[in-house]
Image: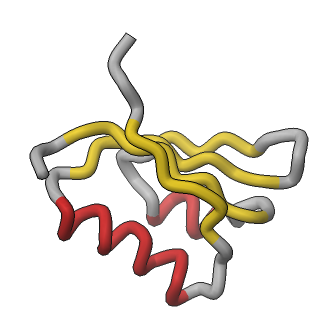
Amino acid sequence: MSAHVVEVVVTGRLGPSLIAALDGYDVTTRDDGTSSVTGMVADQSGLRGLLGVFDDLNIEVVSVNRVTPA
């Protein structure tokens, strides 16, 4: 797996300290009560690391989507 942009949708609003820790990712809070975290992951290990952050904090991941360049 090569580097690509992913969008991870999680349940709830992310706090300021977690948003700061997700440096390099864009975080958007949605009207439906979820948050979208979008950014570049280098490889499968990087994706697992990002997902591990949410798992460690007991934040439910709703979906993981590869973002196709416009």
Q: Nearer the viewer, residue 24 or 53?
A: 53
* Relative image position of residue 44 (x, y in whole percent): 20, 63
Q: Please give the name of the residue rendered at 64% of the width and 86% of the height, measured from the top-left corner.
A: 58
Decide: is 39 above or below 56: above
Decide: is 2 above or below 21: above
Q: Is residue 60 left or right of residue 56?
A: right
> Looking at the figure, which quarter contains the C terminus?
top left
- The quadrant holding residue 15 is bottom right
Q: Is residue 69 left or right of residue 38?
A: left
* Relative image position of residue 28 (x, y in whole percent): 66, 41
Q: Please give the name of the residue rendered at 57% of the width and 58% of the height, measured from the top-left corner.
A: 19
Q: Please give the name of the residue rendered at 12% of the width and 52% of the height, measured from the top-left corner.
A: 1
* Relative image position of residue 8 (x, y in whole percent): 52, 53
Q: Please give the name of the residue rendered at 25% of the width and 50% of the height, measured from the top-left corner.
A: 41
* Relative image position of residue 45 (x, y in whole percent): 19, 69
Residue at the extreme top = 70
Q: Nearer the viewer, residue 10 or 22?
A: 10
- The quadrant holding residue 10 is bottom right
